[in-house]
Amino acid sequence: MAGQRKAMDLKTNTIAGWVLGAAGVALGLSIVGGMIFHDERPEKMGYAIEGVEAEGGGGAAAEVPIASLLPTADAAKGAEVFKKCAACHTINQGGANGIGPNLYATMGEAIAQGKAGFAFSDALKAVGGNWDWDKMNAWLTSPRKFAPGTKMTFAGLSNPQDRANVILYLNQQGSNLPLPAAPAAKEPAAGEAPANGADAAVNRVEEDVRGDTGSIANTGTPAKGAPSVDPQAAIEGAKAPH
């Protein structure tokens, strides 16, 4: 009887040992897994999330001027973009303020003023000026950067064309500001060679064979074996495709 009890105790101890050993292994694996697969935000997101700003700003592409996007903007598409704002804002004439102010006739108005006494943040009041095209573009890009300390919680619209579309839509809702002039095309810097290589070659030949009076002149001595001493032939040769 005593031997049987001793055998049962040994079996129980063995089972308990295996259970404790398995628990120790599981705990160890959990610790190691936590060290490898930590839950910090990755440096580069695997996919973009609309309305969420990327952390940091290094290496960002040059911002496209809003004036260059407005001529091709689409107010109908802007109305679709505005649906993201409709949870906090109304835009109809005489519409009530909500979490955010009613936005009817906002373009051209003084920033953080009026709107039936809406309680704007001191941060936005401190910006001053009126809602022009550039200010509205900067605001919609990142409210927190435009007015640090603002109560606006929306992260911003990262797509420049979406901003142009929704700003055009806002402008049609009781404002109707004239569109800004599109930026002038960049002209070549002084001394910069023309983009067309063939034209540049022709210009160089013409300069080489043109005299001080501005007429074609053959003032040089042709090198031995030169294919032609005719200046016009040299110009035509430069124009020919190679």
Image (cartoon, rainbow, N blue to C red):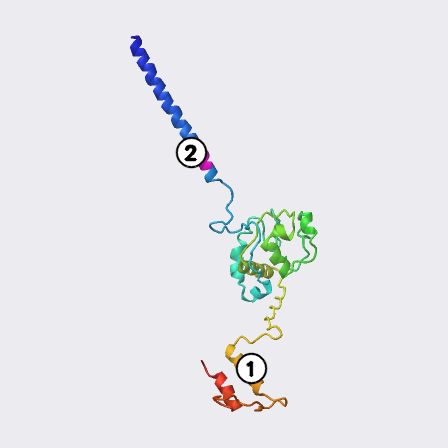
Kindly identify the residue that appears in the image at 44 percent across and 37 percent down.
33
| Tag shown at residue 101 | none
- Foreground mark, 1 or 2, reads 1
| Vertical placement of residue 149 versus 13, above or below | below
Residue reaching furthest to the top: 1
**Dominant secondary structure of the magenta stretch?**
helix
Residue 6: give x, y in percent of width and height: 32, 12
State yes or no: residue 68 in magenta: no
Q: Circle 1 sits in a helix, a strand or a loop, which is it?
A: helix
Q: Which quadrant, please, contains the N terminus?
A: top left
Decide: is 206 above or below 190: below
Q: Quadrant of residue 30?
A: top left
Horizontal and vertical percent for residue 24?
Answer: 42, 27
Residue drawn at point x = 36 percent, y = 18 percent: 13
Q: CA distance from mark 1 to mark 2?
A: 74 Å
Label 1 environment density (alpha carbons within 10 Å; few <14, some 14–19, many ≥20): few
Residue at mark 2:
29
Marker disc for residue 204? 1
Residue 122's x, y, as percent? 69, 48
- Asked if residue 104 can be seen in this view, the reply is no
Q: Nearer the viewer, residue 222 or 102?
A: 222
Report the amino acid beneath label 2: Leu
Stretch in magenta: 30-34
